Amino acid sequence: MARRNTRKPKLEAPWLAYTDLLSSTLLILSVVVVASVLARLTNEKPPIIRLSDAKDYRFARGSFEVSKDFRERLISQELPKIDKAVRCYAIDTIEIIGHTDKSPNPGISNIDKYSDPKKMSKDFKRIYAGSNADLGLLRAFAVQSLLEEQIGDKYIDLEFKSYSASSLINPETSNSKEGSSDKEKRRIEIRLTRSSKEAVITRC
């Protein structure tokens, strides 16, 4: 008679099963980490360029002229940040918002004679603001002109937009005295945006 094989089948070593499980777990974790990093990079927003926090970025009362200190500081300290943000975050639009205080600004405006901001920037000395709304817009145009001068030719698709955020005036409460809060209101804000809604991976 043939002898019955009573040998038990060999079992795989337990550590091999644990190794396979560990490998699978690490692979899953790697995929999750990569996906989360890509999601963060594609949804990361550009940094905010805040000019309102610095006293050098102020306009004289009723004026839209960019002072020497304003210009030098904007070019030396803020422009490198703006330039880097445009490159890193695929920025295609720079919005400049001009603010005013609550001081009355009566006069006759001739802004409507200029249909192009570039023509306006070349003739600033002949332009008059008839209201705070005009003044806020002219302040934005003045900074826009400076930015276009510095980086306008560097980025072909970069668009500049200027807006006015003027303060309304209550004749009953308006005061001719100038306070620190008035100076803080005569400021500029710069916003860096993307018009496209498509996800873009940060380039820096």
Image: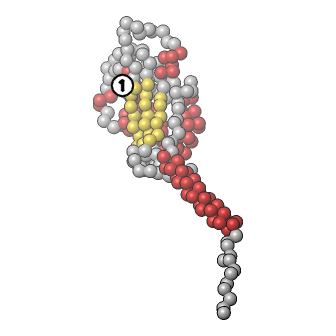
Residue for badge 1: 134
**Residue 110 coordinates in the image, percent (x, y):** 31, 26
**Residue 166 coordinates in the image, percent (x, y):** 39, 23
Query: What's the residue at 57%, 27% (across, down)?
Result: 54
Which quadrant of the structure image shows residue 11? bottom right
Callout 1, which amino acid?
Asp
Query: What's the residue at 39%, 45% (across, down)?
Result: 195
Whether residue 123 can be seen here? no
Whether residue 26 can be seen here? yes
42 and 180: which is toward the camera:
42
The image's colour scheme reads secondary structure
**Residue 164 coordinates in the image, percent (x, y):** 39, 28
Q: Is residue 116 left or right of residue 190?
A: left
Query: What's the residue at 67%, 84% (across, down)?
Result: 5
26 and 162: which is toward the camera:
26
Q: Is residue 60 left or right of residue 136?
A: right
Which quadrant of the structure image shows residue 163? top left
Quarter of the image where the N terminus is located? bottom right
**Residue 156 coordinates in the image, percent (x, y):** 43, 50
Q: Find numbered disc 1 in the image and state the secondary structure of the residue it sits on.
A: helix
106 and 13: which is toward the camera:
13
Query: What's the residue at 44%, 50% (across, down)?
Result: 199
